[in-house]
Image (tube, rainbow, N blue to C red):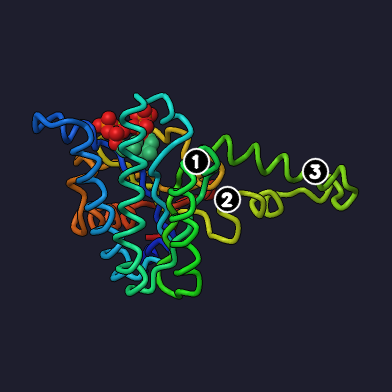
Amino acid sequence: MTMEKQIDPQHVAIIMDGNGRWAEQRGMPRSFGHRAGVEALRRVVRHSSGLGIRYLTVYAFSTENWKRPRREIEFLFGLLREYFKKTVEELHAMRVRILMIGDMTPFPADVRELAAKAGQKTRDNDGLRLQIALNYGGRADIIQAARNLAGQVLAGTLDPAAIDEDCFARCLHTAGLPDPELVIRTSGESRLSNFLLWQAAYAELVVTKECWPDFDGAALENALAEYRRRDRRFGSVPRKK
Ligand code: IPE
Ligand code: IPE
Ligand code: MG
């Protein structure tokens, strides 16, 4: 009997959900949960770095989150300001490279500037590559890739027959990254909510019970253990056990 070991994922993506409920369970305002969520992110980035995960993509603000009350959105902008100001040094010391995916155009100029600076400062780091999805939507990502390709066709620099999956993927916000092998969603919700629709085509989905502020290194390792138990067939037949 041969035991094939499931190789650990290179790219883990996380839908950080449940901040509001976590706070409400404690009789606190939703903002309290968002603040605790930032601490959870710091913990998980540290732990992921230590585990040797290459790419970590976290969903922080979706294209649908604009539907939230203005006050909550403003609070999230404030947290982003703080995060970029306080955490960049720590990330840099861990050799983490930080990037944003999504369209940050509607964000306040100073938040965009802080994000750009964080990217600039850490651009040559060779550790974990942390991607923060801000005003990200899987559909918006696919649309902007389609527009880009249509422009190239119109300019006469691309033959439509040459558009294949690799060519398309190179136009997405995640260009150059392997697809996530594992997508984790916290707080018990089993949906993608418009996250990485193209990229997660064959990802293993792991839904955890705890709300995001309670997620920690042990919870991450449990999700990885669950991933290792999965039989990834990619449309083929079961692997020999
Ligand atoms: C996730 O937690 C954080 C963001 C989407 C910004 P939620 O704010 O969605 O928390 P719940 O799902 O309402 O509990
Ligand atoms: C998804 O969570 C977006 C982020 C975690 C940033 P939501 O809480 O916004 O998604 P729904 O409303 O449960 O689908
Ligand atoms: Mg939610």
Q: Is residue 17 above or below residue 99?
A: above
CB under 8 Å between discs 1 and 2: yes
Who's the residue at 59% across and 41% down the image? Answer: 141
**Which residue does the numbered mark 3 point to in the structure image?**
151
Give residue 196's mark.
Answer: none
Q: Earlier in the sequence, mark 3 or mark 2?
A: 3
Instruction: Name the kind of residue labelled 1 in the image.
Output: Tyr
* Percent of width and height locating residue 131: 45, 55
Please indicate, yes or no, whether residue 189 appears anywhere in the rendered image.
Answer: no
Instruction: Name the kind of residue labelled 2 in the image.
Output: His
Corner quadrant of residue 31: top left
Quarter of the image where the C terminus is located: bottom left
Q: Nearer the viewer, residue 188 or 110?
A: 110
Who's the residue at 48% across and 40% down the image? Answer: 107
Q: Secondary structure at mark 1?
A: strand
**Which residue does the numbered mark 1 point to in the structure image?**
136
* Percent of width and height locating residue 199: 53, 47
Q: Nearer the viewer, residue 87 or 231?
A: 87
Q: Is residue 84 above or below residue 146?
A: below
List the single residue furthest toward the right.
156
Instruction: Name the kind of residue labelled 3 in the image.
Output: Gly
Give the distance between the C-alpha atoms of the residues marked 1 and 3, in whole angstroms: 22 Å
Quarter of the image where the N terminus is located: bottom left
Please indicate, yes or no, whether residue 123 appears anywhere in the rendered image.
Answer: yes
**Which residue does the numbered mark 2 point to in the structure image?**
173
Q: Earlier in the sequence, mark 1 or mark 2?
A: 1
* Percent of width and height locating residue 239: 44, 57
Who's the residue at 33% across and 69% down the image? Answer: 89
